[in-house]
Amino acid sequence: MATRNITVDTSALVRRSLEGKKINWFDQFVAIALLVSLLSGLLILATLLVSVFSSGFGVLADRGFDFITSRLSPDAADAGIFQAIIGSLILTGFVIVVAFPLGVGAAVYLEEYAPDTKTTRFIDANIRNLAGVPSIVYGLLGLAVFVKLMGGFTGGRTLVTGGLTLAVLVLPIMIITTAEALRAVPQALREASMGVGATKWETIRYHVLPVALPAIFTGAVLTIARAFGESAPLLLAGAVLSLFFSNSADAGIGEYVFDEPYTAMPIVIYNWARQPQQEFVALTSAAIIVFLMFLLAVNGVAIILRDRYERK
Amino acid sequence: MAVATDTTAPIDLTGDRRRLRRERRVRWVFFAAAAVSVLITIAIVLSLAGQAWTFLSDIASDPETGLGSLAADGWFPRRGRYQVMSLIVHTLMISAIAMVFAVPLGLGSAIYLSEYATPRVRRVLKPTLEILAGIPSVVLGFFALTFITPNVVKAIFDDASNSNFLAAGVAVGVLLIPLIASVSEDAMRAVPTALREASYGLGAKRWHTSLRVVLPAALSGIVAAIILAISRAIGETMIVALAAGTNGIMNISPLRGGLTMTGGMAQLAIGSDQVTGSSSAFQSLFFVGIVLFFLTLVLNVLSNSVVRRFRQRY
C-alpha cells in the first residue's frame, strides 16, 4: 500500500509541474463525466434503499417484534418471518461447518503442499471455473444429488439439503479467498521455520496459519454473507414456495433439520414479491429491511476483522 | 583431556518416525479437501448430462413430434413444447440491455477511482460501491418490479407491460456495475506508473493519459471483466424470475417480457406441482441447465485466459 501511494503522488507531481495552473476545460469535462458515472451507481443504491425503507417502515413500526416472531401466513396482517430467519440461520450454520474447513483445507493443499504439476493446475483451473458456475446450476446439483440420490440421508427437501447445496456453492469462493490470504504470508517465514527443523505441517500450523488467519476469517465472513443472500439454488433444492406452511410444534432440532419443510429469508422475499396485493409490497419491503440488517451485521464483522488486520 | 565422542555413526536428521507419519497423514487430509472440488465438478456434469440425455431421448421417442418439440412454438414444458431457442434469445436480450447499461457506468467508475480520485475520496467511494455489490439479487428483482418498471420504464414508454426486459436488464446491469468497476480498476492500477509519468512528460493532459495511455494498457483486464460480467448476466436468476415475466412465447420487444433460461428453470421449480418425479418437464430443467452450464463455462474460460495473458505482460 505504502509504495503505491508514493508512486501515485510522483505522477501527480509530474503532471502538476508540467501543466502549471492553467485549467483545461475538456480535461475538467472528462473528470466530471467519470465522476457522474460513479455517482449514478451510488444514486441507484440510495434510491433502492429509500424506496424499500419508505414502503416497509410502516409495517415494522406498526407490528414491531410481532413481525419477526410471527410465522408465515396467507393473511398479510398476520404474516411474519420467524421461520425464514431460523431457516436462514441454520443454512448459514451448515455453510460454516461444511464449507469453511473444506475450503481452508483445499487452499492449504493448493498453496502449501501441491507440487506444480498438471494435476494441480487442473484442480486450480477447475476451482476457478466452479466459482463462475451460475448459482441456479448448483440448485440442480442439489436437486439431483442431495434431494434424489441421497434422499435417504437428507430426508429430501430439508434444511440439510439446502445447507449442503449452499455449502457446495460457496466452497470454490472460500478456497480462492483463503488461497489469496495464504499467498500474502511472506515466504521468509516458512523458510525460517523449516530452517530450524520444523516439518511442513508444523510450519503451517504454528507460523503460516496464525499470520493468515485474520485475512482468512475476513474472506470467510464475506463468503458466508454471500450464502446468506443466495436464493436461486434454494428454489430447486426444496425450500417451501407456498405462502405458509407449518412445522410440527414439538420437533426437536434434529428432526427440524432432517425432516421438516423449510424456507429462508430470500425465498420468503421472492414469494411475497410475486403477490399482487398491495399489502404484500409493504410486507416484502419490511422483510427486505430485516434481511439487509442481517447482511449489514455480517459485513460489519468482516470490516472490523479487516480493520484489525490492517492495523497490525 | 579429549572427550571421547562417537563420531563414526552419521547423525540421523530425518527425525522421529511418528512425526513423519503424522506429516504424511496431514498431507492426505488436505489433498482430500482439494479433491472434493473435482468431485463437485464431476457430480455437476454427471447429474446434468444424465438427466438431459434422458430428456432428449424421451422426447425423441415421442412418435408424434420427436425432436421437433425443441423447435415447437414457445417454451411450455408442461405441454410438451420445448423451444429452447426462445429462452436463449430472451437471455441474450436481457444480457445485452444489462451490458449497455453497466459497461459505461462500471468502466467510468473504474477510471475515476483509479486515475482521478484522491486517496481520501477513494477510501469513501470504493466501499460504498462495494455495498452495492452486496445487495442480494432478490432485492434488486423486487426493486425492478416495484420501482424501475412503474417509475422509470412506464414513465418513458407508457405502453410497456408490467414484466419487461428493459427493467429486468437495467436491474441486472446494476448488479454488474460493481463487478465491472472493481475488476477493471484492479487492471488499471496494475499499469506501471512510469507509463503515466512518461505520458505527462510528453505534455499529455490527464484525460489523454487516462483514456489513451492507461486504458489501452489495461485493455485485456477490462475485456476479461466484461466477459465475466456477461457470464454473470446470463446466469442471474432472481431478478429475471421476478421482473421479466413468465411468457414462453418468443418475444424481441424490450418493453414486453419473456422467460429466460434461468427464469424458465425457476418457473418450473415454483410450478404448482413443484416438478417432482420423472416427467419430461422435470428433466427439461436439466437440459436447460446443461446449456447454461456450458455457455457460462466457455465465457469463464475465455475471461481467465485473457487475464492470464494480461498478467504476463508486466
Image: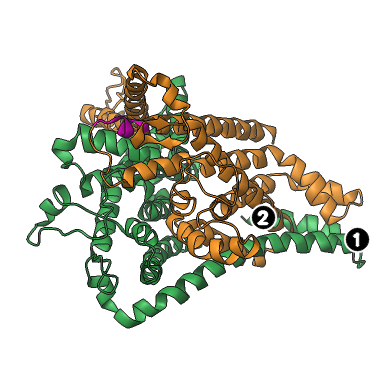
Chain colours: A green, B orange
> Mark 1 falls on what kind of element?
helix
Pointer 1: residues within 10 angstroms few (<14), some, or many (20+)?
some
Based on the picture, tell me whether residue B280 belongs to the magenta stretch. Answer: yes
In the picture provided, is B32 more to the left or to the right than B224?
left
Q: Report the residue that reaches farthest toward the front.
A: B64
Q: Using the rendered image of the protein, determine whether residue A175 is visible from the camera's viewpoint.
A: no
Under mark 1, the amino acid is Glu
- Which residue matches tag 1? A19
Q: Report the residue that reaches farthest toward the left.
A: A250
Q: Is residue B282 above or below residue B176?
A: above
Tell me which segment is drawn in magenta. B278-284
Q: Position of residue B170 (x, y in %)?
A: 58, 54
Q: Is residue B189 above or below residue B123?
A: above
- Which residue matches tag 2? B105
Write the residue at 23% across / 62% down: A83
Residue A152: which disc?
none
Please state the chain letter of the residue tagged with numbered disc 1 in the rendered image.
A
Please state the chain letter of the residue tagged with numbered disc 2 in the rendered image.
B
Q: Position of residue B268 (x, y in %)?
A: 35, 41
Write the residue at 15% across / 47% down: A258
Residue closest to the eye, B265 or A159: B265
Pointer 2: residues within 10 angstroms few (<14), some, or many (20+)?
many
Q: Position of residue B26 (x, y in %)?
A: 28, 33
Based on the picture, tell me whether residue A206 belongs to the magenta stretch. Answer: no
Residue closest to the eye, A160 or A72: A72
- Dividing the picture into quadrants, the one containing residue A44 is bottom right
